[in-house]
Image (cartoon, rainbow, N blue to C red):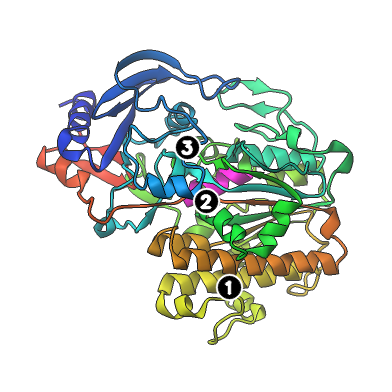
């Protein structure tokens, strides 16, 4: 059986009525530049959208319902709607920028033969899943929070608008005064007006005040944070520091749309390169190397610090971009794996074998760290691990701001990205709409408050632009909706070489 015949057989299995509760849709590229999405109730064949309108593809053929056609960025943008449509059906869901997100995957040399997208309800705990999930195309898994605050930002309050995560890096380069270097855009064409070597995003210039450029930019990345939960905690008074930032800037109620796959390593790198995963090279948390015939795993305790080994040399991080613009700029990547080019990096310290020293300087001991919900620190191993990591990151951030960390002779960072892991761990463990999830937001807010205070002590708060975002959203699954597409494929005599979170590599 040829690869095309095997793929067609696999698509038939995956879109069968037997699997419609666990497979939202199946994606593949039958030939270069052509892409297909198939669901139980219809399919579409299309060509890549243009850079001028990534929401609008060139449709070749549609049969039945186009699985990608609903591009509504406003869907389920309140907690009430999220609760009303818990685990929405495919006909209720939306998939913003999905044509563009699907097309970019097959620009990577190790793109899969097929991508199986989980339904919102699918619970796969026995295959490494969680109660709270992400990774798929749908709006709740793709939508991250997005807040601009402080110096140089228009203060529009909460607005019904959105951005994309690929827009962040070029926007940071712009607002910090970097020069346009020229580079490749998402469609492969060259542009002389880009800020990074490769740039899929655009500058959010309409939300900045050019006459008030900041001295510093800080990103607070709340990993895996569902924006509806974040904003609800703010409204309930549980996140006063994020509330303060919201009051001093613009909050995008429709959030920031992450790239496919909506997972950690892929979209951390998207945020800090301005490129989709297939373009910057970190394709997923795990994928299959066709040449070496091995699985590449970038998200594990033993490999996070090595993720940048897979960065496409034709791209650059915002750290490299700012350094190219001004070699004297100090930058910092705190608990951030996408750290290439940063002057100071937590994971560079890991690569040097200095993690024990970092932990010691952070003041972490056997006791419960401050700003921690003791109940979950004691009961959840993931909560405890993420709290400890975030506490160490907090100490590094404050030390760098106050220029007294690790006896380093560094200027205060002009750009710093601070990654907080606790929200992702808690939302995975008990679902985003949970007491544990809200506790994670409160604990993280308290740590953000200490960083804001450090800027105030240094008289730099009013000169700083703060960005609050996440790498992806999070959605609660239904523990009663279970099943395995791998078993179904094997029962049909279809051998899958590797199932990397829905990335399927077929053995022909």
Q: Is 64 on the left or on the right of 75, as rendered?
A: left
Q: Does residue 354 appear in this view?
A: no
Q: Quadrant of residue 177?
A: top right
Q: Earlier in the sequence, mark 1 or mark 3?
A: 3
In this view, 87 is above or below 479: above
Checking the image for residue 187, the label placed there is: none
| Element marked by disc 1 | helix
Instruction: Give yes or no for residue 446 being in the magenta stretch.
Output: no
Q: From the viewer's perspective, is 176 left or right of 448?
A: right
- Which residue lies under the disc numbered 2? 228
**Nearest to the observer: residue 394 or residue 312:** 394
Q: Quadrant of the C terminus?
A: top left
Q: Which residues are magenta?
A: 263-272
| Nearer to me, 251 or 124 | 251
Q: Secondary structure at mark 3?
A: loop
| Mark 1 lies on residue | 355
Sequence order check, earlier mark of 2 and 3:
3
Give the residue drawn at x 60%, y 20%. 52
Please name whichever residue, 119 or 231, is drawn nearer the observer in this view of the structure. 231
Residue identified by numbered label 3: 75
Task: Tell me the crowding category of disc 3: few under 14, some 14 to 19, or many 20 or more residues within 10 angstroms, Cα based.
Answer: some
């Amino acid at each position: 059986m040829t690869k095309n015949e095997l793929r067609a057989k696999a698509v038939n299995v995956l879109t069968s009525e037997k699997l419609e509760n666990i497979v939202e849709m199946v994606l593949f590229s039958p030939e270069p530049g052509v892409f297909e999405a198939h669901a139980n109730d219809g399919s579409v064949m299309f060509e890549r959208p243009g850079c001028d309108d990534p929401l609008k593809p060139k449709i070749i053929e549609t049969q039945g319902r186009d699985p990608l056609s609903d591009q509504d960025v406003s869907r389920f943008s309140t907690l009430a709607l999220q609760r009303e449509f818990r685990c929405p059906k495919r006909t209720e869901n939306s998939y913003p920028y999905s044509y563009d997100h699907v097309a970019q995957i097959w620009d990577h040399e190790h793109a899969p033969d097929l991508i199986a997208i989980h339904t919102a309800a699918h619970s796969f705990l026995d295959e490494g899943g969680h109660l709270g999930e992400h990774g798929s195309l749908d709006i709740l898994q793709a939508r991250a929070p997005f807040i601009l605050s402080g110096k140089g930002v228009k203060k529009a309050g909460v607005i019904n608008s959105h951005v994309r995560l690929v827009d962040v890096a070029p926007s940071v380069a712009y607002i910090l005064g970097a020069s346009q270097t020229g580079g490749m855009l998402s469609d492969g064409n060259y542009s002389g007006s880009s800020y990074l070597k490769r740039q899929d995003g655009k500058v959010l210039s309409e939300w900045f005040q050019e006459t008030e450029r900041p001295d510093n930019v800080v990103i607070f990345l709340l990993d895996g944070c569902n924006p509806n939960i974040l904003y609800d905690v703010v409204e309930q008074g549980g996140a006063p520091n994020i509330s303060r930032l919201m009051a001093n800037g613009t909050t995008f109620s429709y959030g920031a749309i992450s790239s496919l796959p909506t997972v950690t390593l892929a979209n951390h790198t998207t945020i800090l390169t301005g490129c989709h995963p297939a373009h910057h090279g970190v394709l997923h948390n795990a994928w299959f190397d066709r040449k070496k015939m091995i699985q590449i795993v970038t998200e594990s305790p033993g490999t996070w610090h090595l993720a940048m080994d897979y960065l496409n040399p034709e791209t650059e991080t915002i750290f490299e971009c700012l350094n190219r613009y001004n070699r004297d700029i100090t930058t910092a990547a705190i608990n951030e794996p996408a750290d290439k080019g940063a002057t100071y990096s937590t994971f560079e310290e890991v690569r040097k074998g200095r993690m024990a020293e970092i932990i010691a300087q952070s003041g972490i001991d056997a006791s419960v760290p401050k700003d921690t919900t003791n109940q979950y620190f004691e009961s959840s191993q993931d909560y405890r691990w993420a709290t400890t990591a975030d506490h160490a990151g907090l100490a590094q951030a404050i030390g760098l701001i106050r220029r007294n960390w690790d006896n380093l002779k560094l200027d205060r960072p002009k750009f710093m990205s601070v990654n907080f892991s606790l929200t992702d761990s808690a939302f995975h463990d008990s679902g985003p709409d949970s007491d544990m999830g809200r506790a994670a937001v409160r604990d993280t807010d308290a740590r953000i408050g200490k960083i804001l205070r450090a800027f105030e002590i240094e008289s730099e708060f009013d000169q700083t632009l703060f960005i609050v975002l996440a790498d992806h959203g999070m959605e609660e699954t239904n523990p009663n909706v279970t099943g395995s597409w791998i078993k179904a494929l094997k029962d049909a005599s279809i051998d899958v070489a590797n199932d990397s979170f829905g990335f399927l590599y077929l053995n022909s």
